[in-house]
Image: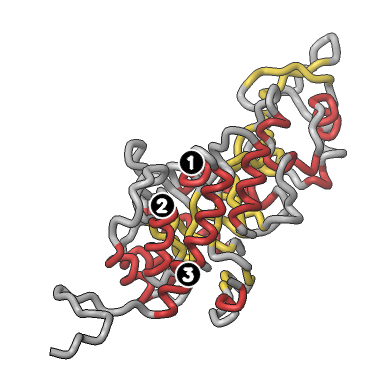
Amino acid sequence: MTTTGMDGKVTIRLNGKAREVGADITVSGLLDELGLVPGMVVVERNREILARESYATVRLSEGDQLELVHFVGGG
Amino acid sequence: MSTHASADTPFVVGNREFGSRLIVGTGKYPDNETMVRAIRASGSDMVTVAVRRIDFDRTREEGILYHLDPGEFFLLANTAGCYTAEDAIRYARLARAAGFNEWLKLEVIGDETTLLPDTQATLDAARVLVAEGFKVMAYTNEDLITALRLEDAGCVAVMPLASPIGSGLGLLNPYYVRAIKERCEVPIIVDAGVGTASDACLTMEQGVDGVLMNTAIAAARDPVRMAAAMREAVVAGRLAYLAGRMPTREVAVPSSPPLPK
């Protein structure tokens, strides 16, 4: 599954949509790119919740399924 | 108000004391500023929030933590919108990973039209989540047997509905809610269906420990004012319950001494 493109990009699925990201980008790097504050989100990668401490070290690979969730208004 | 309240036992759920018997939701407000003002007016210290996929175009608008200070309010994450035990468990874990607390309003819906709970799935999820260390406050219907099972499963509170979510129909079955309150040891918090202040008051008059509401405040013409009304109604209902109402009679009894004949 590690089919890194010639341009050094990989395609992941982010909240249900395909997205190209730099090969070897970390979760922290992706959150930065998206302008998200790590303390405000929870990240699930391939259905497994990632510990915040691992954001800086976990690198994304081709085909990774990422779910980014946060708290919204609800009853 | 506080002089009367001091005569009451504290409102304790899962070893944690709360200042208000009113728990409010954060959904469906016209805007975030109104939401925060209404929550402050309600006097609640526990507020419910939902977990949802981030919409990258509306992150700041939707993200409740951009508007609500988690230092000011105790956040109770819900599993609203989940239709299976598996989904509810997944969302519960996501909520806990947010890092605030291990409390959860467990809600597993069984039907899209009525939004009535799937009590079997709720029980299944409750058992798993309690074993994982969650403090589960379980939304359920007004069925005593389910309430007892949820208590047995280790839930820290059982939360029967007054009427369907968002219906505003008020307390449809006071008798069953009282039966649950009489038989369960854990706090009973009536969740969903309250429409206006008298509903909240009547609900508290049944002797339950608290009320949870969202739409009744958020969908009022003036949510901040309705929140203030709910605050008073919950206190009034609680006081009336503690005071013990007079018996009802089907004949009139004069309040003033009779005139000499």
Q: Are marks 2 and 1 in contact (CB under 8 Å)?
A: no
Q: Earlier in the sequence, mark 2 or mark 3?
A: 2
Mark drawn on residue B194: 2
Q: Are marks 1 and 3 in contact (CB under 8 Å)?
A: no
**Eyeballing the image, is A4 above or below A27?**
above
Please name the amino acid that badge 1 sits on.
Answer: Ala
Left or right position of B207 against B227:
left
Measure how far apart labels 2 and 1 are at the Cα level: 12 Å
Task: Pick whichever, B216 or B229, lies toward us.
Answer: B229
Whether residue B52 is visible to the viewer of this picture, yes or no, is yes
* Residue holding disc 3: B209
Instruction: Identify the residue shown where x is 81% and y is 37%.
Output: A37
What kind of element bears circle 1? loop
Left or right position of A47 against B242:
right
* Residue holding disc 1: B220
Whether residue B148 is visible to the viewer of this picture, yes or no, is no
Instruction: Identify the residue shown where x is 55% and y is 82%.
Output: B7
- Circle nearer the viewer, 1 or 3: 1
Measure how far apart labels 2 and 3 are at the Cα level: 15 Å
- For disc 1, the chain is B
Q: Are marks 2 and 3 in contact (CB under 8 Å)?
A: no
- Circle nearer the viewer, 2 or 3: 2
- Circle nearer the viewer, 2 or 1: 1
For the residue carrying disc 2, how many other residues have a C-alpha within 10 Å: few (<14), some (14-19), or many (20+)? many
